[in-house]
Image (cartoon, helix red, strand yellow):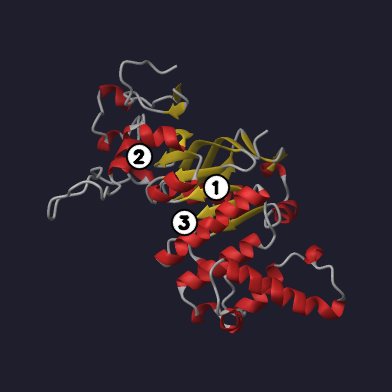
């Protein structure tokens, strides 16, 4: 049974132009111990999917799904109190903007103390403070922070974005969750420490069987660290399957465009040569194109693309395209 099972997840919000659907019938499935990559351009709805899983969207947003289950529990049927008990201990999330997630009026050390699980402390009352300080020191060292004394005494605004992100990751792994949602976890972290963070995620995955939903636009990390990926465009799932298969032979033109945009340093590039890009930009939700949402930007678009493509399956890939990149084979 999948640890996280999502079927036809839709997220809408009310605007002066009426109700707008930002996420449209997205499917996701994560098995215990699996690392799934969720990729796409900015504005494709990746973070909204993560926030819907966590239940932290405000009242403006309307979430519906045929199935939104974690470990057999229907998340949409839980009350706010029941949801809070589940989040943090079972499901944890690393957010994109760490400083906005930390309390600006409290020291980092005190916030780390509050994030520690109370049931793990097996020492006497008089030894609890020492145990907590040692536990926090260990967590900070795991994420690459050596000057833990200074960091614990500091307020979030006194630290860099990269250090705050490391603190957020330390707080996230303190409860040893079964599902970790990492939304661009290393964007603001220096390049030298990014590998350490991913090795930590791999260690959690291999030793504690932590399932990870990695949300990123960095396809190199996706190729190196994930087992399967789901590609989103403009709020919809366009392709999903095993990472090695999709990187070897993508079926959707948008996936192909993402892969072609990766710089390949083993190839000779001319001086000031233009990198491969997909023309145009993601359309606004108020003015979506008719039929396939990629249509105005797609190099393979034809007249049939004014119709909405249906999800198809071929060679283990799921994709939604009228003219997939398949040679001499019809999708099954």
Q: Position of residue 37 (x, y in %)?
A: 49, 44
Q: In the figure, is residue 143 to the left or right of 256?
A: right
Front-most of residues 147 and 63: 147
Q: Residues within 10 Å of mark 1 (few under 14, many from 20)?
A: many
Residue pointed to by mark 3: 184
Q: Closer to the observer: label 1 or label 2?
A: 1
Q: Where 206 falls versus 304 (above or below)?
A: below
Q: Closer to the observer: label 2 or label 3?
A: 3
Tag 1's secondary structure? Answer: strand
The image's mark for residue 288 is 2
Identify the residue at the far left of this view: 271
Say which label, 1 or 2, has the lower sequence index: 1
Tag 3's secondary structure? Answer: loop
* Residue at x 46% of width, y 71% of height: 161
Front-most of residues 282 and 165: 165
Q: Position of residue 182 (x, y in %)?
A: 53, 54
Identify the residue at the far right of this view: 124
Residue pointed to by mark 1: 213
Q: Where 283 falls versus 319 (above or below)?
A: below
The reply to whether dot 1 and dot 2 touch (C-beta < 8 Å) is: no
Say which label, 2 or 3, has the lower sequence index: 3
* Residue at x 57% of width, y 63% of height: 169
Tell me, yes or no, if residue 300 can be seen here: yes
Q: In the figure, is residue 199 to the left or right of 111?
A: left
Q: Residues within 10 Å of mark 2 (few under 14, many from 20)?
A: few
Identify the residue at the far front of this view: 266
Q: Residues within 10 Å of mark 3 (few under 14, many from 20)?
A: some
């Amino acid at each position: 049974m999948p640890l996280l099972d999502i079927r036809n997840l839709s997220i809408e919000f009310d605007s002066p132009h009426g109700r707008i659907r930002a996420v449209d019938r997205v499917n996701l499935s994560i098995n215990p111990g699996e690392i799934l990559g969720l990729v796409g351009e900015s504005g494709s709805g990746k973070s909204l999917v993560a926030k819907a899983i966590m239940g932290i969207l405000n009242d403006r947003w309307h979430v519906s799904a045929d199935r939104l289950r974690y470990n057999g529990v229907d998340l949409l049927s839980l009350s706010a109190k029941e949801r809070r008990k589940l989040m943090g201990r079972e499901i944890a999330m690393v957010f994109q903007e760490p400083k906005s997630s930390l309390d600006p009026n409290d020291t980092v050390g005190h916030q780390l103390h509050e994030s520690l699980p109370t049931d793990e402390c097996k020492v006497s009352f008089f030894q609890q403070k020492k145990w907590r300080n040692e536990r926090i020191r260990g967590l900070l060292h795991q994420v690459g922070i050596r000057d833990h004394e200074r960091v614990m005494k500091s307020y979030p605004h006194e630290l860099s974005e990269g250090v705050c992100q490391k603190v957020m990751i330390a707080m996230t792994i303190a409860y040893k969750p079964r599902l970790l949602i990492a939304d661009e976890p290393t964007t603001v972290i220096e390049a030298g420490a990014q590998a350490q963070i991913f090795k930590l995620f791999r260690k959690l995955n291999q030793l504690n069987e932590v399932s990870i939903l990695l949300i990123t636009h960095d396809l190199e990390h996706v190729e190196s660290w994930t087992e399967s990926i789901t590609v989103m465009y403009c709020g919809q799932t366009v392709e999903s399957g095993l990472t090695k298969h999709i990187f070897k032979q993508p079926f959707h033109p948008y996936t192909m465009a993402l892969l072609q945009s990766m710089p390949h340093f083993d190839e000779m590039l001319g001086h000031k040569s233009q990198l491969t890009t997909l023309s145009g930009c993601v359309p606004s939700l108020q003015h979506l194109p008719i039929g396939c949402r990629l249509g105005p930007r797609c190099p393979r678009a034809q007249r049939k693309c004014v119709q909405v493509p249906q999800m198809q399956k071929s060679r283990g890939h799921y994709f939604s395209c009228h003219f997939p990149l398949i040679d001499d084979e019809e999708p099954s």
